[in-house]
């Protein structure tokens, strides 16, 4: 049996065309469009492409950017590359397991890291902690 992450189908094999565009073709969703912007429960955010845990809810904050934002990632969960598309230089963030495009990281976040991981909500799934409401 083949690994669904390698085929870009996610854990359940049910990624939407828009999720595939973001994760596999380095797309971006419209700002303010993700339901995860308003997610406040305790839990973890995972890669929609393979299920790898990426961010804990305690590191999420309201950046005002229109995308779910975090000030830190789970150690070893993400990788970065230099992105020179769109006439600028940015640091692209991808899943360390399946290499799915997640978003970008910027040096204008809050303490303690000073980083803003600005993620596409469609590239993430949220798993609430047991008992979180």
Image: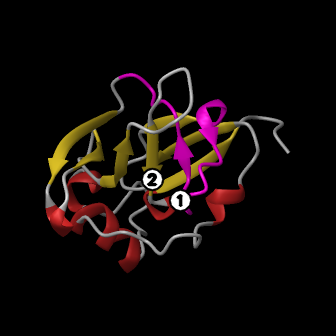
Which x, y percent locates residue 122?
48, 64
68 versus 17 height, above or below = above
Looking at the image, which residue is at 29% across and 46% down?
94
Quarter residue 97 falls in: top left
Which x, y percent locates residue 42?
73, 37
Query: Does the magenta portion include 70?
Result: yes
The reply to whether residue 1 is visible in this rendering is no
Closer-to-camera residue (20/6):
20
Colour option used: secondary structure
Looking at the image, which residue is at 25% across and 64% down?
26
The reply to whether residue 67 is visible in this rendering is yes
Name the residue tied to disc 2: 119
Would residue 31 be found to the left or right of residue 42 on screen? left
131 versus 101 height, above or below = above
Closer-to-camera residue (78/130):
78
Which x, y percent locates residue 118?
45, 50
Numbered badge on residue 67: 1
Would residue 17 be found to the left or right of residue 5 on screen? right
Would residue 55 be found to the left or right of residue 3 on screen? right
Secondary structure, mark 1, is loop
Spatial distance from mark 2 to mark 1, Cα to Cα?
6 Å
Looking at the image, which residue is at 65% across and 65% down?
35
* Magenta stretch secondary structure, dominant: loop
Quarter residue 66 falls in: bottom right
Which callout, 2 or 1, points at the residue further toward the start of the chain? Answer: 1
Q: Residues within 10 Å of mark 1 (few under 14, many from 20)?
A: many
Q: Look at the numbered discs 2 and 1 and tell me whether their residues touch, using CB distance below 8 Å.
A: yes
Which x, y percent locates residue 31?
52, 70
Query: Does the magenta portion include 62?
Result: yes
Quadrant the C terminus occupies:
top right
**What span is colored magenta in the figure?**
57-75
């Amino acid at each position: 049996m083949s690994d669904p992450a390698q085929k870009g189908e996610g854990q359940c094999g049910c990624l939407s065309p828009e999720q595939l565009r973001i994760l596999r073709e380095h797309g971006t969703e419209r700002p303010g469009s993700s339901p995860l912007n308003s997610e406040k429960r305790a839990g973890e955010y995972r890669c929609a492409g393979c299920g790898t845990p990426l961010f804990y809810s305690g590191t999420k904050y309201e950046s005002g950017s229109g995308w779910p934002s975090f000030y830190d990632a789970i150690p070893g969960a993400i990788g970065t590359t230099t992105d020179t598309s769109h006439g600028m230089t940015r640091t692209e963030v991808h899943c360390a397991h399946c290499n799915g495009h997640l978003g970008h990281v910027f040096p204008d976040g809050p303490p303690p890291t000073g980083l803003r991981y600005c993620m596409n909500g469609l590239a993430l799934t949220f798993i609430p902690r047991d008992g979180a409401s």
